[in-house]
Image (spheres, rainbow, N blue to C red):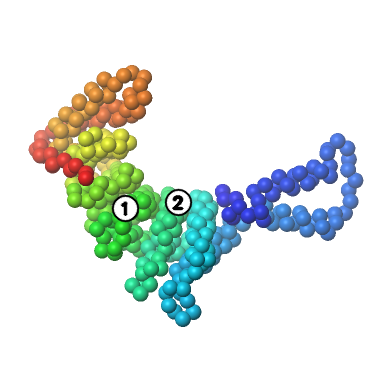
Amino acid sequence: MATGGSGTEGNSPFAWLGLLKWSLAFSDGTAPSDVERMSEEDVAFLEKVMSEGIIDEGERMKSILKDVTGGLEIMLGANITADGSGDGESKQEEKRKELEEDEMLELLQELRDIVEQIDYARAFMAMGGIPFLLGCATYHAAESAADRTIPKSIRKGALGVLSTMCQNNPPVQLSLLEHGHMPQLIQLFFDYTTGNDCGNDGDDSIREKVVQALSASIRGHSMAEHIFCQNEQGKVMLQLGLGMQQKAPKPSSQLRKRSLFLLRALLTSDDATNERHELFQDVISFICTHEINEEWEEDAEIREMSLSMLSQLLLHNPAQSKQSSSQERVSKTILQHKNYIGGLGVNRIQAIRNLKEGSEEREYATLELEEWERMMVALAEAENEGASDVPQLEICDMYVPP
């Protein structure tokens, strides 16, 4: 729950403590106190404390929306002089603009704290919060005003609020669909991908926030999952986020984790079908040949996530009642790489077991060891179920990042 504001004295989180101390000063509880009519000053004091100590979250969200909107208007027009030229921003105005950016970030963080509660998230949606946040995150300045744009920090703050308010919140997820959020956010991902057509520098911190927001808006919502999987650009976004493009720099570990998390949610969803697994067949193969290999993937957590996903896909049929061939299809995709996976597994399990017992390195690798052991069991069980007659695929050349 937000404490209400940016730490000003008029909104002190200790207002209730002050009220208690004031009350105790007039009555210690050891003897009956004389009851007298309160003075106007005392009544005014109590009313002030009560009004400042109890925060109306709905009104606070309106206030935040108004303040951030006003701040952005000033920011985007801060360097325009009275005659319309673009070089009239003084040092004082630059300093003010910088402070306003920090203040807006604080307000967005406060808003994020408020909309963690589902009811407040829906209330913020009802007051027009979704188009505001989408506009804030995806704003493109006109060519004539290309020097005036929304800072990356504000974009990421808006994306963070979006992620929080739509998490496990079907009405908000549906509203995002109605506002056409997927193409907008996917395009924002490409706008900050290295080699983009917008002239922006590649920025994985923004791309990671985009994937996080899309993931929160899609997961658990049948229609949203289906629409995303049918969007070819969405698949390309996941491929870029995982690092499947050989000529591009390897994405940050956080972006790879976000992308892998979304991929797993889509493939293991209750609504996953044979068609969906087939759409992501090349991505599943990439996970089998790259993301579990220590020589390619240096992040142990990503290797663990990848192994866990592959094991789950082998052992669990998410759409058994809807599509009986779905499990067989994805099992065959993974089992095409069984010899490669098995060879990696034997070597990695042996390497971890050879680490000194009780050492920090051995402790760090414990989870990966467990995932590898589970993966080997899953491979064996999948073969025993009759899916072992699949052809072996050649392993694609290992990409060595620059």
The picture quadrant where one finds residue 260 is top left
Picture layout, residue 338 above or below residue 84:
above
Does residue 33 appear to the left or right of 186 in the view shown? right
Find numbered disc 2 in the image and state the secondary structure of the residue it sits on. helix
Residue at mark 1? 225
Which quadrant holds residue 21? top right
Q: Earlier in the sequence, mark 1 or mark 2?
A: 2
Residue position marked by numbered label 2 in the rendering: 164
Q: Is residue 252 above or below residue 370?
A: below
| Residue located 67% across and 47% down the image | 14
Residue 7 image position (x, y, % from top left): 61, 52
Task: Report whether residue 65 is seen.
Answer: no
Residue at left offset 18%, top offset 38%: 289
Q: Residue furthest top?
A: 357
In the picture, residue 366 is in which quadrant? top left
Query: What kind of element bears circle 1?
Result: helix
> Which residue is depicted at the point 83% across and 39% down?
28
Q: From the viewer's perspective, is 41 left or right of 399? A: right
